[in-house]
Amino acid sequence: MSRRIIKSLPDMGKARNRMDSPKTVREPLIVPPAVAEFGKGRAYLIKTFGCQGNVRDEEILAGYLEAAGMHRTEIESEAGLVIINTCAVRENAEDKVYGEIGKFKVNHQKDPSFVLCVCGCMMQETGVAEKLVKSYPYVNLIFGTHNLSNILSLLDERLARKKDLVDVLSYPGDIVENLPSIRLDAYKAFVNIGYGCDKFCTYCIVPYTRGRERSRAREDIIKECQELVEEGYQEITLLGQNVNSYGKDFHDGTSFATILEDVAKLGIPRLRFMTSHPWDFSDEMLDVIAKYDNIMPCIHLPVQSGSTTMLRRMGRRYTREQYLDLVRRIREKIPGCALTTDIIVGFPNETEEEFEDTLTLCEEVKYDAAFTFLYSPRKGTPAAALEDDVPDEVKHERFNRLLKVVEAGVMSHSSQMVGKTYKVLVDGPSKKNERVLSGYTETNKLVNFEGPAYLKGQIVDVEIVEDHAFSMIGKLTKDPLIILAEKAAESLKEEPEAIAFLEAKKAVEESPSLIELRGQIEKAQKAMVQKAADSDDEAYEKAKNEYLSLMNSYKKDPVVLNYEARKDDLEELLRIVKGTLS
């Protein structure tokens, strides 16, 4: 009898289907009793490969596991459950996954209850799950991108049946809300606004691994972002395989510009988004980005190739001229906007002329950063079936030539930063030197500078003093304690205790009866002083008693009593703030 149950395997035909209507699923989180018992005191470890979307998936998986009583560890030997969360975009990412799986065979030998899971985009590819079953029999759970919210039920089934499971759904996809989440960063957050892709670029596996384009409801996105703002997050990045397509499936005029503006209005200090497809990047989007200071002037705009004929073979839906026109409009409406991109070298049958078009486009645009890749065929995509007549040595030579052109563009921007001051969101101390902090400017340029660890999560002014092309060296423009004190003073204005104190103070100052009473107290005080000067003891005692009586009436007034109580509350808050500064 087999020790493994194969419930479903990936099907590229079903994955291509775009006819079904997506559902929004809202179910309460229920932890099966057997999983809760299994999870008690158990450490889990998640290893994630790939994009920001995969990182967000890790946070959700962690939310489920911690709801079941588990806790995170980064030490492989301590883990009682491991999830390897995979990426399918490039072949080298897949190779790393197989290497990682091999590490955890020893965990099974040490702990018979150990569970090894492999999930994510790579599992949605034809043949991968079967390869894992055959070559890595100690993998206990295999599931795909559409099974993410089923992790606890899959684990429950595995415990109950004492058999390993393979369950990789292939369908256009639904939207699951009420997902638990353990954020990996206390100041920067990723928020999915949609899933999947309908573009079907000929080289890309994502439409098959992530399903159709489907947008989350506006109210769900706003609720998640509002909670992040209230929790003190400094930066939100809106995620989608193609954020520009947001809202098109609603058929009611909703667009990405709509949700981008809605989130900007929440007051998050920094708002980013990725990724944008050039084909449907609208002027409406540009207007919104230009309108709000908290939308960062940095746009990731994958070009893939600078050749119109190559773009046509890639299925990119725009020409070289249309892309360059979009770049021109971006720089006209958002001066100083940083542009980053993705470029593929060595797409099947790339000619020297087509590659030269990519070089000249990069020279013209002068990207702030570019992610360059040698083409990696993905099984099941149209491009994988193409015969290629370009030798590998030619592809690598072109790749090296491209890197030099890209680097020249990066250096042209970074060299202009020296001597200027930028706002940097501090990520924290360097692993190599705890006295050196690192963070990113509004245009997403990495800056390293000396400073104390308590500035983590703060947005600080940093002057650039050295240009290292892909990263910069800077120095704080203010003393760190002054920075922290200013931030504390600014945040105090928003605290309920401070607001209540100011309201109570205003009530005392503007109360007609208290204004009259303060006048009487002032007269009584002057009379008391005068009697003391006259050496008239009897008259002085009478004036003193009159003054004390008026003061007693003032202190017992309900409006004054409320003010004193609010002042005590504020003083307690100030003591806490003082503790953070010391």
Image (tube, grey):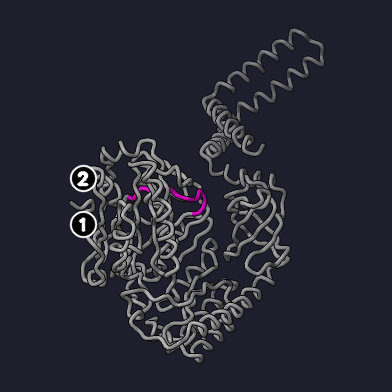
- Residue 223 visible, this angle: no
Amino acid carrying mark 1 in the image: Lys
Dot 2 crowding, Cα within 10 Å, few <14, some 14–19, many 20+? few
Direction top: furthest residue: 538
Q: How far is mark 1 from mark 2, CA to CA?
A: 13 Å
Q: Which residue is mark 2?
A: 161
Q: Are marks 1 and 2 in contact (CB under 8 Å)?
A: no
- What secondary structure is the stretch in magenta mostly built from? loop
Q: Does residue 438 appear left or right of residue 273 in this picture?
A: right
| Front one among 436 and 441 | 436
The verdict on residue 186 being magenta is: yes
Q: Give the quadrant of the C terminus.
A: top right
Residue range highlighted in magenta = 179-188
The verdict on residue 239 being magenta is: no
Question: Percent from the top left, x then y, of residue 64?
Answer: 34, 46
| Front one among 376 and 336 | 376
Q: Which residue is mark 1?
A: 7
Q: Is residue 533 above or below residue 99?
A: above
Quarter of the rendering containing residue 94 = bottom left
Question: Percent from the top left, x then y, of residue 368?
Answer: 58, 72
User: Which comes before the other along the chain, label 1 or label 2?
Assistant: 1
